[in-house]
Image (cartoon, rainbow, N blue to C red):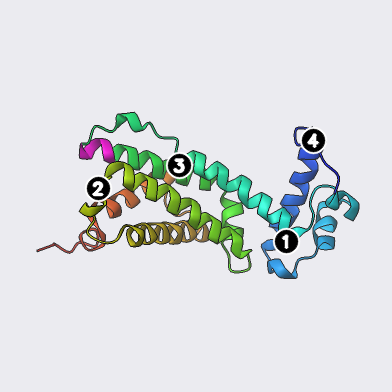
Amino acid sequence: MSIKNNLDPRVIRTRQLLQDALITLLADKEFEAISVQDITKKANVNRATFYSHYEDKYQMVRQIVREKLVDLDSAMKNVDFSMYDGKPNSLDEMALKSYFHLFEHIEKNSYFYKVLLKRQGPNIFRRRLYEVLSTTFEKGIAFIQPKKNKYLVPGDLLVSYISGATLSVISFWVENDMPYTKKHMAEYLLKISRNGVLTTAGLESN
């Protein structure tokens, strides 16, 4: 595979054509059923051009996933942690901004997320998305509560629950054409995180 200049506008344009072609094909076909020939035909480029950019479709999808999730990770971390003074209000403000940036990023890339989170999308995307969410939540929880002996449940279980629930919510949101605004989604997740499932469902705790 030849080495391409990633800053060359022609390289960027060709890779975008190939990536768009794969995403379009994934809307209707299983990833394993899609061939390089399918991708090049949809992108209107030849096979030699494809192989000058990617080793195969697996290397291609790994790169697509990596680039998109780097953007997601940056979006969620776009919060000023210096605002935290240990009080609930500042904590809520930080969490709200992080959730808002999460859904803002997904809204901007809604078709991409909708397609890749569908059943026929490559498993690597859902797995890597979970890993990004898990790492972010683990660091966030450790920041606000560095004393793990204060946790009511094991830390890894807590992170797993939050990450899995958030991934499920993201899937729900894009699969249902984003029925709530990104602002409302951030507020709703904050309410669930702050109050817990039972209180959010309107059940008074004893």
Label 4 or label 1, whichever comes before in sequence order: 4
Tell me which label, 1 or 2, sits earlier in the chain: 1
Q: Residues within 10 Å of mark 3 (few under 14, many from 20)?
A: many
Q: Amino acid at mark 4?
A: Asn
Q: Nearer the viewer, mark 3 or mark 1?
A: 3
Lateral position of residue 124 relative to residue 200, left or right: right
Which range is magenta? 87-91
Residue topped by disc 3:
76
Of label 3 and label 1, which has the lower sequence position?
A: 1
Q: Amino acid at mark 2?
A: Lys
Residue at screen point 72% across, 61% down: 25
Q: Tell me which residue sits at (81%, 39%) in the image.
A: 4
In 3D space, how far apart are the residues under numbered discs 1 and 2 (Cα atoms)? 48 Å
The residue identified by callout 1 is: 25
Which residue type carries mark 3? Met
x, y percent for residue 14: 80, 43
